[in-house]
Amino acid sequence: MVGHYKRIAIITGAGGGIGYETALFLARQGYRVWATMRRDSQQQALAEAAEKERLHLLLRTLLLDVRSPEQIEAARQAILEAEEAHFIGQEHPPLLCLINNAGYGVAGTVEELPIRAFREQMETNFFGALMMTKAFLPLMRETGQGRIVQISSGFGRVGAPMMSAYNASKFALEGFSEALRYEVLPHNVFVSLVEPGPVATGFNQNMDLEQPPDSPYAHLHKRAGLLARTGERIASSASDVARTVQKICEARYPSLRYEVGVAGYLAKLSNQFAPQDLVEGIYRFL
């Protein structure tokens, strides 16, 4: 255990991409980091990276599948027991920052995607964040401070063909987070949404894609691949997202929404200013 620290960060989905980079980045800034992931191999890789950078006293890893209430409760108990001395009886306890990052993407048309794909998308991207929030919110309220950072997406602002399941999960996360923010503001707990566009993490390559043979939507599947490759050319880095997370954790009054990257800002502008007829016209002629 290291000495007293100002901030504790709990990060889900830290086995790769944004979560992995954010865990290391915050540890470099002196945060006490609890990084969670689903696989032993991911846990070992992050622990080795922390050891190499001499961050192992600040960064701890836990196996956690955010779809499992039992694993979430076990992780909550492990973290609170390990950090109890920093909260109990302390005049200035550390600021607890929960970063709900765990998530993945499903691509396919509504007609072709099975209902199971929608349910599984919601279980991880929405219900996982919901259950993690409910697990750690009481401690934030009791200590009179906290940050809940939801890693959303530009697709939490605008719909797109082939992305209905992912859109649904991120739209749900956005509405939930905005409502939650109003509930917990009186307790000095701030909820913020991070809305990146494409991020260079291999997200597209790892996306589950439903593309039946002889699909009546073959033109959309073809265009979706082209758009994904175009997005990769303007992708932000995982470090860009990590710096935004740090900004939120250290702001006195963090905002509700933070866009990251060119595409993230375009999603905001499209949501606020683009006429629906214009958006439909663009998609109609893709």
Image: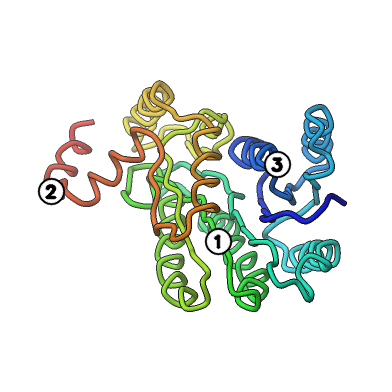
Q: Are marks 1 and 2 in contact (CB under 8 Å)?
A: no
Upstream in the sequence, badge 1 or badge 3? 3
Colour scheme of this structure image? rainbow
Q: Say which amino acid is labelled 1.
A: Ile
Q: On screen, 231 above or below 266?
A: above
Distance from disc 1 to disc 3, alpha carbons, whole Å, reads 18 Å
The crowd level at tag 2 (other Cα within 10 Å; few <14, some 14-19, many 20+) is few
Where is residue 255 drawn, in percent x and y? 40, 57
- What is the quadrant of residue 93 in the picture? bottom right
Upstream in the sequence, badge 3 or badge 2? 3
Query: Residue at point 40% right, 59% down?
Result: 256
Element at label 1:
strand
Q: On screen, 196 above or below 85?
A: above
Say left or right for 57 vs 22: right
Q: If the image is split into quadrants, where does the C terminus sit?
A: top left
Distance from disc 3 to disc 2, alpha carbons, whole Å, reads 43 Å
Residue of label 1: 148
Element at label 3:
helix
Residue of label 3: 27
Nearer the observer, disc 3 or disc 2? 3
Residue of label 2: 275
Q: Say which amino acid is labelled 2.
A: Pro
Query: Residue at point 23% right, 45% down?
Result: 270
